[in-house]
Amino acid sequence: MTQKAKLLCPLDFSHGSEFALFYANKLAETIDAEVHCVHVIDPTPYGTLMEGAYVSSGSVQASIDRIEEHVKEEFNKTLDKYELLHLEAQGHFLHGDPAQEVIKLADELEVEYIVMATHGRTGFDNWVFGSTCEKIVRLSHVPIITLKHPTDECSVKDVHVAFDRILCPLDFSDFSKKALGPATDLCRRFGATLVLAHAVDNRLEYPLLEPGLGMQSMDHFETDANKYLDEIASGIEGITVETLVESGNPYKVLVDIMDNDAIDFVVMTTHGYRGLTHLLLGSNAERLVKLAPCPVLTIHPDKDVKKVG
């Protein structure tokens, strides 16, 4: 019997994580998966803030215990609320470094995707988003779907999972091509068009970072990039494939493509080469996760992604 696919959704009680859980449930319906949610409480900040000359270690620990008890109670209330909203999720309440615990749990459960929003709350509840979100994206070997919380609160519960145009940004590295398999699988599942894109960096990285390479025009690089994408597209069967090559700051070019070409999902790897082929990945991937107007599936290049469904 084939094991059912699993999705993991970190919760911090924010509207962003609520949206992510709605999205995870809709995705689970599509790929026949079960949803797990997790809240990680990191006691370190509480103890650091409460320690002082007039506060004993015992009273600090008692205060931390009360805070953890309250947070766990809120977590259970949240699960009950989601159940009333017909959202299914198995809950996990953990202690420790949030990013590390989420990554560890994802590996233990052997989940297909981690699903999380890119913005959460501030203060004590800001544990999974912001820098922690970036850390999970950077370190997790489990593919991650990041979502931008909608500005229209009414649309939070009106989530649907349907893709018409899926963007797969590529540079000239084998790393970036690790995203092609998952991207084409999703296109076949949803009947979507695959858009292969390459951003030619016009900030002179090519001649400056490669010793001995002479100055060449952007037209030269765009021609080579078009040939590169056309060759890849010719080897993909069973789906419609389009190619796009544009020049500019890579992450800005790709965000513009998402906005102007009706892209509703992005599949990309999180690391690429340096020097001549450093066009998209690395810091650009982190920027795209933050700025993308649509969901982004990021894949660690060392991960062999399982085909879901």
Image: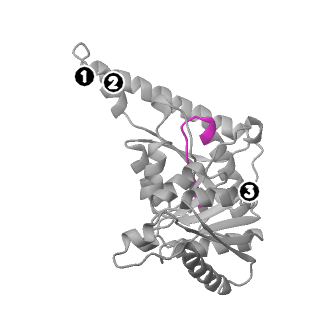
Image point (67%, 53%), residue name = 294
Query: Which quarter of the figure is the C terminus placed in?
Result: bottom right
Q: Is residue 12 magenta?
A: yes
Q: CA distance from mark 1 to mark 3?
A: 49 Å
Q: Is residue 185 magenta?
A: no
Please tell me whether residue 43 is drawn above or below residue 89 in the rendered image: above
Image point (39%, 50%), residue name = 100
Circle 1/circle 3 CB separation < 8 Å: no
User: Viewer-proximal residue, 286 or 7?
Assistant: 286
Number of residues whose C-alpha sits closer than 10 Å to that of mark 1, classed few (under 14), some (14–19) or many (20 or more): few
Q: Is residue 274 visible?
A: no
Q: CA distance from mark 2 to mark 1?
A: 12 Å
Q: Which badge, 3 or 2, comes first in the chain's sequence? A: 2
Q: Which residue is mark 2?
A: 49
- Residue type, mark 2 in image: Leu
**Numbered mark located on residue 3 in the image:** none
- Residue type, mark 3 in image: Val
Please tell me whether residue 67 is drawn above or below residue 21 in the rendered image: above
- Residue type, mark 1 in image: Ser
Circle 3/circle 2 CB separation < 8 Å: no
For this orientation, the residue located farthest to the top is 54
Circle 2/circle 1 CB separation < 8 Å: no
Q: Magenta residues?
A: 6-17
Label 2, secondary structure: give it: helix
**Numbered mark located on residue 161 in the image:** 3
